[in-house]
Image (spheres, helix red, strand yellow):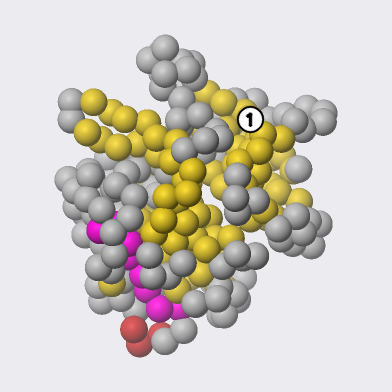
Amino acid sequence: MVFDTVKNTVILMGGDNYSKRTFQDIWSFNGKNWNEIGIFNKPSSYDFIGSEPFIFDIHRKKYIYVNSGVIRLGTKKVTWEMDGIVEESNQFLQLEVTGPLGRFDYALCYDIERKKVVLYGGVLNSYPETIYTNDTWKYDGNIWKKISTEGPSTRRGAKMVYHAELKAIFLFGGYDLELGGYDLEKGYLNDLWKWDGKKWEMIISKGEMPSPRASYALAYDSNKNKILLFGGYKGKERFCDTWEW
């Protein structure tokens, strides 16, 4: 879910309901009503898992989605865009640009200060192995560039958000398979990291922290200059708590 600064609306794309059903619909919310957006072309079920992030590039006025489809994991043509200005052009276009290998459960964020899309981590489904990654990529609207493999450990289910006052991206938690010794009840993280456009830095936060978790919701409150975190899960445990930082 993203905020479209051009139309002043919230845009929701896809998702799943834990009953093996994946949604590919797109909706807008203007503060009062939800409306489904008719899309002429969009990622197929082969390119789309349903719960992956997509972002709004406020400078180019584009919605950007990175391929997460199970069938085509491993492809390098992973970038989809949709125009955020022209209503009649409601269609995602798969771009002929190479980038990070197709993956799922990655973190994606738009860096307003540096005008770049930033992607971190996720899972490559390289049969018979499941490979967790810790690579960082940036995209300027034309090319993807790998910029780091140092920083947070390999993980999935982490989220990133841009902090306008600090002019940096922050990443929290997630799940590291190796850290948990391949035990699905272990390996959850609650570390906090800052990306300044050049390097990752671990932040030692004062006071209490949210418990280790993955797949939570993360957003920036521009009125209070605070990062908000809601929910997530750890193994079979589900959370409905709200935190600010």
Which residue corresponds to mark 1? 191
Residue span colored magenta: 77-84
Q: In this picture, is 84 found above or below 232?
A: below
Per the image, label 1 sits on a secondary structure element best described as strand
Q: In this picture, is 31 found above or below 131?
A: below
Q: Residue at x 31, y 71 (%)?
A: 92
Tell me if mark 1 has few (under 14), some (14-19) or many (20+) residues whose alpha carbon lies within 10 angstroms of its own: some
**Magenta region's main secondary structure?**
strand
Q: Residue at x 25, y 72 (%)?
A: 41
Kind of residue indicated by mark 1: Asp
Q: Quadrant of residue 159?
A: top right
Q: Position of residue 16 (x, y in %)?
A: 36, 46
Q: In this picture, is 196 found above or below 191?
A: below
Q: Position of residue 11 (x, y in %)?
A: 49, 66
Would you say residue 240 sits in the magenta stretch? no
Whether residue 48 is visible to the viewer of this picture, yes or no, is no
Q: Quadrant of residue 62?
A: bottom left
Q: Is residue 181 left or right of residue 57?
A: left
Quadrant of the image for the C terminus?
A: top right
Q: Position of residue 116 (x, y in %)?
A: 52, 63
Q: Position of residue 93 (x, y in %)?
A: 28, 72
Q: Is residue 184 left or right of residue 214?
A: left
Q: Is residue 240 left or right of residue 207?
A: left
Q: Closest to the observer: 236 or 208?
A: 208
Whether residue 213 is visible to the viewer of this picture, yes or no, is yes
Q: Closest to the observer: 166 or 7?
A: 166
Q: Quadrant of residue 113?
A: bottom right
